[in-house]
Image (spheres, rainbow, N blue to C red):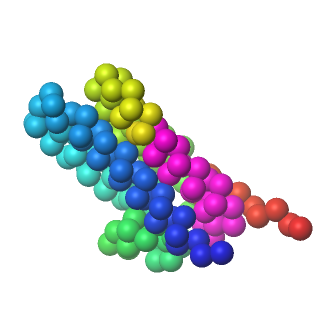
């Protein structure tokens, strides 16, 4: 199976979720919408810098864009520290939790946002993580032998 398609779809669904968050902020303030976009860009780059840059297979990353960006940092590979995992989780939480303040006012946007987030996460966890070549990744799972 071509693993690049689920990787790309995961990024697309994650991007759609962020765009929904931005859209939800627009009626309140253009500045809040722009601030959320800026926070997402900074958090995304920090995730790539902290987590993806130390991946041994970043040059063949099925997510494509994070793998490409991670090649700008020549970071040694090895097991992820608990600090790295916690920081990555916090950065993802920031991206996901900030728009909840305004998404709660629109059931439709709230539901679509969470469908996109869950779809992006599940595409990685169920399709990409099994058999991933990054032996250090905490989400890596072995492909069941048949």
- The residue depicted at 32 percent of the width and 72 percent of the height is 72
- The residue depicted at 42 percent of the width and 39 percent of the height is 112
Q: Pick the residue in front: 14 or 84.
A: 14
Tell me where residue 11 appears, x and y as whole percent.
42, 59
**88 magenta-colored:** no
**134 magenta-colored:** yes
Could you tell whether 23 is left or right of 94 in the image?
A: left
Tell me where residue 89 appears, x and y as whole percent.
47, 41
- Secondary structure that dominates the magenta span: helix
- In the image, residue 21 sits, relative to residue 75, either above or below, namely above
Q: Pick the residue in front: 65 or 29.
A: 29
- The residue depicted at 31 percent of the width and 42 percent of the height is 20
Could you tell whether 72 is left or right of 114 in the image?
A: left
Q: Looking at this rendering, what residue extends furthest in the right direction?
A: 146
- Report if residue 3 is visible in the image: yes
- Report if residue 76 is visible in the image: no
- In the image, residue 120 sits, relative to residue 55, either above or below, namely above
């Amino acid at each position: 199976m071509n693993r690049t398609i689920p990787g790309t779809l995961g990024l697309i669904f994650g991007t759609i979720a962020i765009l929904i968050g931005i859209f939800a902020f627009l009626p309140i303030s253009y500045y809040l919408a722009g601030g959320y976009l800026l926070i997402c860009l900074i958090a995304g780059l920090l995730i790539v810098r902290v987590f993806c840059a130390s991946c041994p297979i970043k040059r063949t990353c099925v997510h494509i864009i994070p793998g490409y960006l991670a090649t700008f940092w020549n970071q040694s590979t090895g097991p992820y520290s608990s600090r790295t995992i916690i920081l990555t989780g916090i950065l993802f939480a920031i991206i996901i939790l900030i728009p909840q303040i305004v998404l709660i006012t629109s059931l439709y946007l709230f539901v679509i946002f969470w469908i996109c987030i869950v779809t992006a996460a599940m595409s990685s966890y169920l399709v990409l993580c099994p058999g991933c070549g990054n032996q250090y990744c905490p989400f890596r799972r072995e492909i069941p032998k048949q």
